Image (spheres, grey):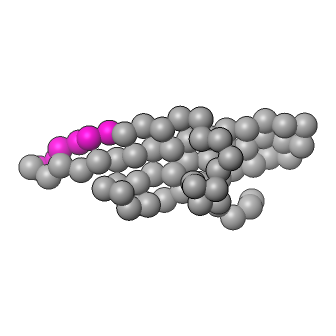
């Protein structure tokens, strides 16, 4: 598997979601960025998850 690309390097983010949550009197924002692709050389998908503007994790999958 390839190393994950930073979400800012993704060529065309398909979806972005922003969730505002409250848990035990603490408010926080979760942002999800997703992208997928298909070409003659294979398929791929990626996700980046932020909590309060801090990157928590990112994943990238590809299959030839």
In this view, the residue in front, 64 or 37, is 37
Q: Which residues are magenta?
A: 19-24
Residue drawn at 51 percent across, 44 percent down: 33
Looking at the rendering, which quadrant does residue 13 occupy? top right
Q: Is residue 56 left or right of residue 3?
A: left
Percent x, y for residue 54?
A: 38, 61
Q: Main secondary structure of the magenta part?
A: strand
Quadrant of the image containing the N terminus: bottom right
Percent x, y for residue 6?
A: 59, 60
Q: Is residue 60 left or right of residue 43?
A: left
In the image, is residue 20 part of the stretch drawn in magenta? yes
In the image, is residue 60 part of the stretch drawn in magenta? no
Percent x, y for residue 24?
A: 11, 50
Percent x, y for residue 43?
A: 78, 40
Q: Is residue 34 left or right of residue 32?
A: right
Residue drawn at 42 percent across, 37 percent down: 17
Residue furthest left in the image: 25
Q: Is residue 44 left or right of residue 57?
A: right
Residue furthest bottom in the image: 3
Residue drawn at 75 percent across, 49 percent down: 62
Looking at the rendering, which quadrant does residue 20 occupy? top left
Residue drawn at 80 percent across, 46 percent down: 63
Location of residue 16 with respect to 11 vertically, above or below:
above
Count of residue discs: 0
């Amino acid at each position: 598997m390839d190393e994950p690309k930073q979400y800012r390097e993704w060529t065309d983010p398909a979806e972005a979601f922003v969730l505002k949550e409250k848990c035990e009197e603490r408010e926080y924002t979760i942002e999800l960025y997703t992208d997928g692709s298909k070409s003659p050389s294979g398929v791929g998908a990626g996700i980046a998850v932020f909590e309060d503007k801090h990157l928590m994790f990112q994943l990238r999958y590809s299959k030839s």
